[in-house]
Image: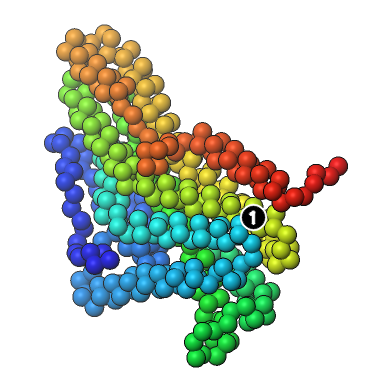
């Protein structure tokens, strides 16, 4: 954590675009990331560099982020050491540990890779602005997405408060015996508060990670699509040479986004699968604590949220594949125009075509799987299989 706030300036990167006579990237806010950066900072994850002229303001932000990190770490330790005495059954315990562990790892991953993430996003935004300044980078509905983040987090927090502090509070007062010379009520309240706040923070972190990945995938896909539109106007030798250089920059930019987010995507999918596991475990649990309307509401919202996350991420990752398809279609259209031009122009266009055909642009999860629409079917099949297995192990007979 020491290097989180080493500098107050924009982090530089080794990437240097080659010299091309294209429009200079304007300093604009025609993207969704300036709101995302403010949201991540509010949640203690400083993705963007802190630019402030006041040392007091910088120190205040530093203390805020470090306090949030320490708070999450302490509540994680308290909840993990006591939750086995709170939640009934092994399945719900495993689901809690699995979900909160992966969520905490996702948070740490974002903090550790924040400079790489910021540099990758900045290069994609700048390059898109150079190709077509009118394109909005990221999701145009980012304000509603952030609003949904806070509303859904408050909803989940309300469900946890009702379940832990009201429905099960009396049983916790009996099972959580304090080993310290403090009142039983105080000790129980601290433990339950840690469990509730940690799980609610895990949910919010998971949602925030989805927004970051989704908007970054849209930025990469929009960049590829913008370049596909620019190919159609390349009919001269100079414009094709310019396009060849731009495509090399594009490939590096997309690869940087994948390198910045592939581990985050991997842990995020683990978090979502853990969320599915928790919901299905509660659904098939025979414990009386999980047969209440509050628990059923949690199951419904969790399953809905999990399906939405898988859908959003795969749609976002699939935009890169769609962009590559547009590139190939643009090449076919461009080849018809180039056919009647000079051999020198045709030779450079062939070089550009070879570069595009040999490129493999995709978003991955630690390069173990590709994030596209096909991944949704894979995850869905796994969840359905687990549901049937859990149904069989539950011992409930089929009824007609």
Q: Which x, y percent locates residue 388?
A: 68, 43
Q: Nearer the viewer, residue 294 or 76?
A: 76
Give above or below for 244 relative to 84.
above
Q: Nearer the viewer, residue 115 or 202?
A: 202
Where is residue 48, by image quadrant? bottom left
Query: In which quadrant will I find the C terminus?
Result: top right
Where is residue 227, by image quadrant? top left
Q: Which x, y percent locates residue 337?
A: 30, 14
Query: In which quadrant will I find the N terminus?
Result: bottom left
Q: Kindly give the residue lying farthest to the right in the view shown.
A: 400
Q: Kindly give the residue lying farthest to the left in the view shown.
A: 19
Q: Is residue 141 visible?
A: no
Q: Is residue 247 left or right of residue 283?
A: left
Q: Is residue 11 left or right of residue 150?
A: left
Q: Which x, y percent locates residue 95?
A: 56, 57
Q: How is the model colour-coded?
A: rainbow
């Amino acid at each position: 954590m020491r290097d989180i706030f080493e500098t107050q300036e924009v982090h530089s990167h080794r990437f240097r675009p080659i010299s091309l006579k294209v429009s200079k990237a304007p300093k604009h806010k025609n993207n969704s990331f300036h709101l995302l950066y403010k949201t991540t900072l509010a949640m203690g994850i400083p993705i963007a560099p802190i630019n402030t002229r006041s040392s007091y303001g910088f120190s205040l932000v530093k203390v805020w982020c470090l306090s949030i990190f320490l708070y999450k770490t302490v509540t994680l330790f308290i909840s993990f050491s006591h939750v086995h005495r709170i939640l009934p059954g092994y399945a719900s315990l495993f689901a809690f540990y699995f979900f909160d562990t992966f969520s905490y790892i996702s948070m740490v991953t974002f903090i550790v890779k924040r400079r790489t993430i910021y540099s990758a996003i900045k290069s994609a935004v700048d390059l898109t602005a150079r190709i077509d300044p009118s394109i909005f980078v990221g999701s145009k509905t980012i304000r509603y997405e952030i609003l949904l983040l806070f509303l859904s987090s408050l909803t989940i927090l309300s469900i946890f408060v009702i379940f832990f502090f009201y429905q099960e509070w009396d049983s916790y007062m009996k099972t959580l015996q304090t080993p310290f010379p403090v009142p039983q009520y105080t000790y129980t309240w601290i433990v339950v508060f840690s469990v509730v706040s940690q799980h609610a923070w895990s949910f919010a972190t998971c949602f925030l990670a989805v927004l970051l990945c989704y908007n970054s995938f849209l930025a990469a896909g929009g960049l590829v699509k913008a370049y596909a539109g620019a190919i159609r106007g390349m009919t001269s030798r100079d414009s094709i040479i310019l396009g060849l250089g731009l495509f090399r920059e594009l490939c590096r930019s997309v690869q940087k986004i994948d390198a910045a987010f592939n581990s985050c995507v991997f842990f995020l999918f683990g978090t979502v699968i853990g969320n599915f596991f928790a919901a299905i475990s509660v659904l098939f649990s025979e414990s009386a604590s999980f047969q209440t309307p509050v628990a059923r509401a949690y199951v419904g919202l969790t399953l809905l949220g999990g399906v939405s996350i898988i859908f959003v991420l795969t749609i976002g990752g699939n935009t890169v594949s769609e962009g590559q398809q547009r590139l190939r279609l643009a090449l076919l259209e461009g080849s018809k125009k180039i056919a009647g031009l000079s051999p020198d122009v045709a030779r450079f266009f062939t070089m550009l075509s070879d570069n595009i055909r040999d490129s493999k642009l995709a978003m991955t999860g630690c390069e173990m799987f590709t994030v596209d629409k096909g991944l949704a079917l894979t995850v869905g099949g796994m969840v359905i299989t687990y549901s049937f297995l859990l149904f069989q192990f539950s011992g409930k007979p089929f009824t007609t």
